[in-house]
Image (spheres, rainbow, N blue to C red):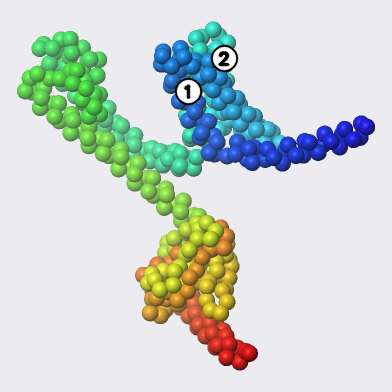
Amino acid sequence: MAAVKRVMSKGAHSNLAHYSAPLRRFGASVLARYLVLAVGLIAMTVLTVPEPRSVAGLWLKACLWCCLGYFAIEGAARLRTAWRVGAARRYLLSVSGLVDILGVFPVPIVLACGAAPETAWLLACLWVLKLAQNSPGFAQLGRVFVLEAKPLASVLVLFLIALFLASAAMHVIERDGQPAAFGTLPASLWWAVVTLTTTGYGDEVPLTHLGHLLGAGVMICGIATFGLWTGILATGFAAESRRRNFIQTWDVVSKVPFFQTLDPAAITEITHMLRRVEMPARTAVIRRGRIGDCMYFIAAGEVQVDVAPAPVRLGEGTFFGELALLGDQVRTANVFTTKQSTLLVLDLADFRKLMVHHVELASAIEAEAERRLGEIQGRRELHLHGGTTSP
């Protein structure tokens, strides 16, 4: 009897695990995290409004506790994974670990200290930090700030110089006419900050002509300063994006058998020509009858070329689309991916440059194109011959 119960219990547990697998997968997904985050922040916001709080305060708090429980389970799962590989301490001291800690412990600690729930749950705004958790975009932006630290600091120095000179000058010009607004240097500093940032609240404005002239100059300096900051960050972000894309494309290009005979200088040159494209399964890459303006190298995955009499599949390390570039530029077949694929795209202008500068690659592409044309023609003739002789 005990054995039967154990078997039944094991079967029930197996069935529960099987049917709950989709729910567990969804709970571990990024979409679920963002959904919980959105619900939690909305509930925290509504909890600060008296009317909804009086009507549905209990439900709002229950919703917030559920969100807190979700983030606690998520953090515990991360800690468990790090513990298994012996990296628990490194995880707890990492940015991701600190975000998980800030997302779980502050609210219960403040509630335990006797704070009002409406005040304690305001700390749920720390959950928004999870948007930056494990985000490659934020990591890239952080690297840009590190690399462009000196130019950014130089512009900050210019901002501080303009700030203090403008506040001191306005203090001297307007202190007699407006002692309440410009009678002290801190008050003038407030005006200078508002004017330099081009916010312009209008609560403190100069009345003298000299003050107006100074204010106009300060506004122009503010626009120039923030324009410099924006330009530095935009240029740095674009350069970092190009660097990251180059490294990823280099890694992919170096693994393509077609390019492995080249020296590093040639691979570098070709990497600048190629664009890496991620294509999902069952996605059309080329359509018959269209004008061809590029060819493709398959770095990973597989594509199917619909040619008569039977389609052909091309795998990793091969290329396609070269026939249109070598001929009349009209696509002769439909091509689509059969699974998730990484393609390297070579545009027509770069294709012609490649054919001129790398004769060995040009010869290989032309030879493969001739072989494919001959194979396609042979298949068509065989198909037609077989069709006429068949009963």
Q: Secondary structure at mark 1?
A: helix
Q: Position of residue 146 (x, y in %)?
A: 43, 39
338 vs 13: above or below: below
Asked where in the image residue 12 lies, by quadrant, the reply is top right
> Which is more foreground, mark 2 or mark 1?
1
Dot 2 or dot 1: first in sequence order is 1
Q: Which residue is mark 2?
A: 109
User: In the rendered structure, are the residues bearing label 2 and label 1 in contact, judged by CB atoms less than 8 Å apart?
Assistant: no
Q: Which quarter of the rendered picture does the C terminus lie within?
A: bottom right
Identify which residue is drawn at 19% across, 24% down.
Answer: 166
Residue situated furthest left in the rendering:
209
Q: Secondary structure at mark 2?
A: helix
Q: Position of residue 32 (x, y in %)?
A: 55, 36
**Residue 43, numbered circle:** 1
Asked where in the image residue 62 lies, by quadrant, the reply is top right
Identify which residue is drawn at 49% across, 54% down.
Answer: 247
As rendered, which of 388 and 165 lies closer to the eye? 388
Q: Report the amino acid beneath label 1.
A: Ala
Can residue 168 be seen here? The reply is no
Can residue 309 be seen here? The reply is yes
274 vs 149: above or below: below
Asked where in the image residue 182 lies, by quadrant, the reply is top left
